[in-house]
Amino acid sequence: MEDKNAIMLRPKEEITRILLSTPSRLVGEYEEDEVLITHAWTKESVLRYVTLDRSYFVLSVKTPPIDRSHVLIPDYSATGDVLCIYLSILYGKRFDNHGSIESLGLFYRPSSAPIDIYDPRLPFNSRTPRPDLKVELSLHEIKRIAPLMNEEHVDETFLRFLLSGGRFYVHALQQAESQPEIAFLDLITCGEILSNFFEYDQDDLLDPQIKNDLAQVEEKIDDGDKIVSRIRNQVFQVKRKFVKMILHLLSPIFFEQTEAKGPFLELDKSDILQSIKAAYDLRSRYVHTGVSFGGWIKPNGGFNNEVQLGTPVIDDKELKKILVRSPTLIGMERIMRFCLLRFIHLYGTPVDDRLDGEGLESRETLCMSPNKYFCGLKSANLAAGSCEETDENGSA
């Protein structure tokens, strides 16, 4: 019979422990009934030989015991991925899941993948709080999103969209320095996912010229109303949904603080509409032509510029125009993180009172039409001002 003391030393079937890390530096710990997030310390003697060390944490969570009547054995390591999503959005820092070290009564070796060399000056790597909400780099701050951790009183649809979009945000932070092009596309995909959470009036997703053309068809062609109806049902304005979602989730306080190291290196609220549209155009240009752009938008820790430093010297005039207007990877990351924070605050659980209020869709500088549009979850309708598509000169 096995010694009782030996049994006590064995890993518990109902406890899962997962190793996480970040290039940033957090203090404190977070604890509730069935969850503990605390530090995994590195010996000082090791740190002397590591130029760019990381902070490590262990997530300990209570899990159901093994149901031995089933053949399939559950894998709880993905819990670490979910926590990385929440922490990356909350703190605006990169987090990595290194896998389980204990689960289902067994010990595991965490992932031994090589750690990337990183630039500690970049906002999502640095050891200072992001300036927009100034969320302190303390694990105690997780209490802001505790309902998400417990999945209590949180709408399932909201949670599905948050996690789906959040995965691309986390991946963007992880790839930002090694593959900036992929990271930028990840951020655009994150926005596309969030945009599908909302419902819009179909007319409001049509370009003004297209709406005029459809009116002509309906008026001058036999059975024009039926033709127009079929066209409307086929039209899927992904870009306009993307733009409207960002204008809805960004708010004026987004422009009050920035990490850009200069007055002409930050996103400007007067140009934000064109910037968002250009970001999506950059994605479309890549998808349809394969033209690389990563070198022009890659993060620069020396400036942390959210917009281009000057005008790119390239022969492709169309690409040059898009790049001049588009945010850089740092600018796009800040946009998407703020959108994710407001998304949680408005539709999931309150995060910070400063995230209250209207978005940018009602601002005079952005609204090209007094019409109202529908934007909301099926169970929660929001009325807001509409922003018409503009041409290259900013005219409707």
Image (cartoon, helix red, strand yellow):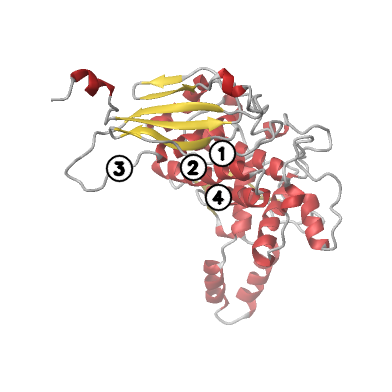
Mark 1 vs mark 4, foreground winner is 1
Q: Earlier in the sequence, mark 3 or mark 2?
A: 3
Looking at the rendering, which quadrant does residue 77 occupy?
A: top left
Name the disc covering residue 195, or none: 4
**What whole-number distance in Å separates the C-alpha atoms at marks 3 and 4?**
32 Å
The residue singled out by tag 2 in the image is 162
Q: Residues within 10 Å of mark 2 (few under 14, many from 20)?
A: many
Q: Earlier in the sequence, mark 2 or mark 4?
A: 2
Q: Earlier in the sequence, mark 1 or mark 2?
A: 2
Q: Earlier in the sequence, mark 1 or mark 4?
A: 4
Q: Quadrant of the N terminus?
A: top left
The residue singled out by tag 1 in the image is 340
Element carrying mark 1: helix
Q: What residue is drawn where x is 63% and y is 57%?
A: 239
Element carrying mark 2: helix
**Residue 306 in picture, x, y percent from top left:** 75, 40
The residue singled out by tag 3 in the image is 74
Name the disc covering residue 258, or none: none
Q: Give the amino acid at mark 3.
A: Pro
Q: Are marks 1 and 2 in contact (CB under 8 Å)?
A: yes
143 vs 51, nearest the viewer:
51
Q: Quadrant of the C terminus?
A: bottom right
Query: Against 197, is 142 above or below?
Result: above
**What whole-number distance in Å separates the C-alpha atoms at marks 3 and 1?**
30 Å
Q: Earlier in the sequence, mark 3 or mark 4?
A: 3
**Residue 227 in picture, x, y percent from top left:** 55, 76
Q: Give the amino acid at mark 1.
A: Leu
Q: Give the amino acid at mark 4.
A: Ser
Query: Against 220, is 135 above or below?
Result: above
